[in-house]
Amino acid sequence: MRHSTRHIGTLLILLFLVPLVVACGGQQAPAQGGSAGGPTAAPGAPATAAPDQPTVAAGQPTAAVGQPESLTPQPNQGAVNPDYLEFGVVSHLYYTDRERVLQLAQNAGFDWVRQQISWQDIEDPVNSIYGWDEIDQIVDAVYASGRKLLVNIVRSPTAYSATNGLPNDPQTLANFVALMAERYKGKIQAYEIWNEPNLAHETGGTIRPEDVGRYVEMLKLAYTAIKAVDPNALVLAAASSSSGVTNESIALSDEEFYRAMYTYNGGEVRNYFDVQAVHPGGAANPPDTMWPDNPSFIEGCLPAPDRCWNDDETHYFRHIENVRQWMEQYGMGDKEAWITEYGWATPNNTPGYEFGNFVSIEQQAEYITRAISRVHDEYPYVGNMFLWNMNFAVLWGEQGNPDHEQASFGILNADWSPRPSYLAAQSLIAQLKQER
């Protein structure tokens, strides 16, 4: 059984010319809109706008996934299990039927939910105002469902960064996460500090190797602030977008980013995170293939590197193996990795995500389950994996665009019915848990 090979850090034991990158999982509180993308590092994948104020009609889950009257109460136990691979799903719980989303997560066997939190939508530094109401409801709903909660904090208020990138003063984020940790102690189990900070648009407009130190300094302060309030909460170093591109107006390659982060100031970052988040790409490639030794053949794709997304390791799910190699090479091998976004797009209408046109909904289900099995059987250093995504098709359907790329990554249809990927993941997760 896999639990005999699990590893975790001491703190755990004690208790997202053409860009070749994409902003992963940038689901923002719909009240503000904002950029968002899918979880793969495919070429020509621009940031796209999240739906504005989606309002989802209330209703019950479909018969295929159960139809209880309301969310089954299961008080969250809070503890992270270091012996087994856990399973999570990226969801959008703002301004929607969140109880229904969480019931579906529970039915599928997901242990965790990941919700992105837009800092600029909560704190108004100019007027010293904080808007916690919607976050309060989300946190309480996840807690009541028995799921554990990973929050991914992004986007500085404009007063702290004119471009809503990394704050000019990292202490401002530390102050904010300290307030969060105090308010939600015991209800938020993990904090992922920022999203894909190797992307220029995530960090403020440009990104160079020497800028990585800004992220490390921010992570250090955030880690210290959270642990001072809630020592049991886990702090994740942000996942780099799977990218081979280095262009200061677009991205820093993930290899360069991890190297700069792990060597900054003598490698001191090792003392300021519990888990390394990872976003392995997939594009249209099956999860067991890898360029150059085992590249995939994408039927119908034009034989050109900029159209087939199979000419670089960063376009493959197995790119996580490279990230792990870098962790070990730079002295971070005692840390677990969590895959906080993975998934496969299907046919969609969003420019830059054409790779989804080469993946059927049946193949999506197959690739997802093969990825889960691969991690379970071959990657003992991975402690958790979050599927992108649960309910974005519902949100985009409400906005009249059910074929948006974010919707195509989903495991639910716009009418809440389960895709084959939902049912396949549900079945496999149940099987793996039964085998423990």
Image (cartoon, rainbow, N blue to C red):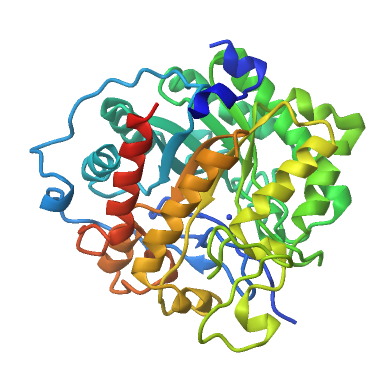
Instruction: Kindly indicate the quadrant of the structure image that contains residue 260.
Output: top right
Residue 210: x %, y % from top left? 88, 49
For the point 68% across and 50% down, the residue is 240
For the point 44% across and 73% down, the residue is 359
Q: Is residue 269 left or right of residue 102?
A: right
Q: Is residue 313 left or right of residue 388?
A: right
Q: Quadrant of the C terminus?
A: top left
For the image, the number of numbered tags is 0
From the viewer's side, name the closer residue of 310 and 144.
Answer: 310
Instruction: Kindly indicate the quadrant of the structure image that contains residue 201.
Output: bottom right
From the viewer's side, name the closer residue of 289 and 95.
Answer: 289
For the point 58% across and 18% down, the residue is 12
Q: Is residue 168 visible?
A: no
Q: Is residue 347 left or right of residue 200?
A: left
Q: Is residue 426 left or right of residue 360?
A: left
Residue 99: x %, y % from top left? 22, 40
Q: Is residue 128 visible?
A: yes
Above or below, 195 relative to 313: above
Above or below, 77 relative to 282: above
Residue 344: x %, y % from top left? 47, 63
Residue 82: x %, y % from top left? 53, 22
Q: Residue furthest top?
A: 14
Q: Residue furthest left?
A: 69
